[in-house]
Amino acid sequence: MKIKEVINILNAKVVSGHHQLENEVEFTFSSDLMSDVLTVERDNILLLTGLANLQTIRTAEMSEISNIIFVRKKKVTTEMIQLAEENEMILIECDYSMFKASGLLFNAGMKPVY
C-alpha cells in the first residue's frame, strides 16, 4: 500500500517526508514500547505509535523503519522533524486512537508484523 493511501484511510497529515508519498509499505506494527519496536525484523514497515519524542525517531532509525504515524493527536516537534529529515523518514500525525488506526489499516489490507 502506498503511503498516500494510508494517509487517506486515516485522514492523517504529513509533517515530514512529503516527497515520499509514493513509497510502499506492506506491514504495520503498533506500539508505544520502543523496546518492542527494536525486535521487529521486517522491511516495508509502518510504525503506529503514540510516543512522540526523539527516542521514537532514534529507535525507528536503529530498526530501519522510515514510516511513522503518531496516533492519538500527538504532535511532532521541530527537533523530531529535523532528525527524521536527516534519516529520510516520513512523519505523519493522526487524530485516531491506535486501535482505530490499526483496525482501519488492517481492513484495508495492511499486514501485521506477526
Image (cartoon, helix red, strand yellow):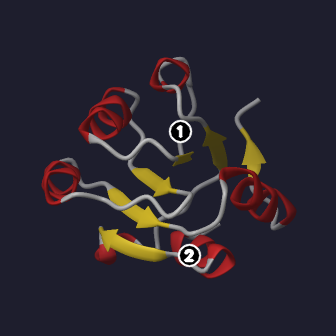
Question: Which quadrant does the N terminus fall into?
Answer: bottom right
Question: Which quadrant does the C terminus fall into?
Answer: top right
Q: Secondary structure at mark 2?
A: helix
Q: Secondary structure at mark 1?
A: loop
Tally of numbered discs: 2
Question: For the residues marked 1 and 2, what is the alpha-carbon distance in whole angstroms?
Answer: 19 Å
Q: Seen from this angle, which residue lies furthest front?
A: 73
**At 86% from the left edge and 63% from the top edge, which residue is drawn?**
107
Q: Is residue 15 above or below residue 56?
A: below
| Res 2 label | none
Residue located beneath label 2 in the image: 7
Q: Is residue 34 above or below residue 61?
A: above
Give, as a three-letter code, the residue at label 2: Ile
The quarter of the displayed image where residue 102 is located: bottom right
| Res 43 label | 1
Position in image of residue 33 (x %, y %): 52, 26
Position in image of residue 42 (x %, y %): 57, 32
Position in image of residue 95 (x %, y %): 57, 69
**At 35% from the left edge and 29% from the top edge, which residue is drawn?**
59
Between residue 25 and residue 9, name the one nearer to us.
9
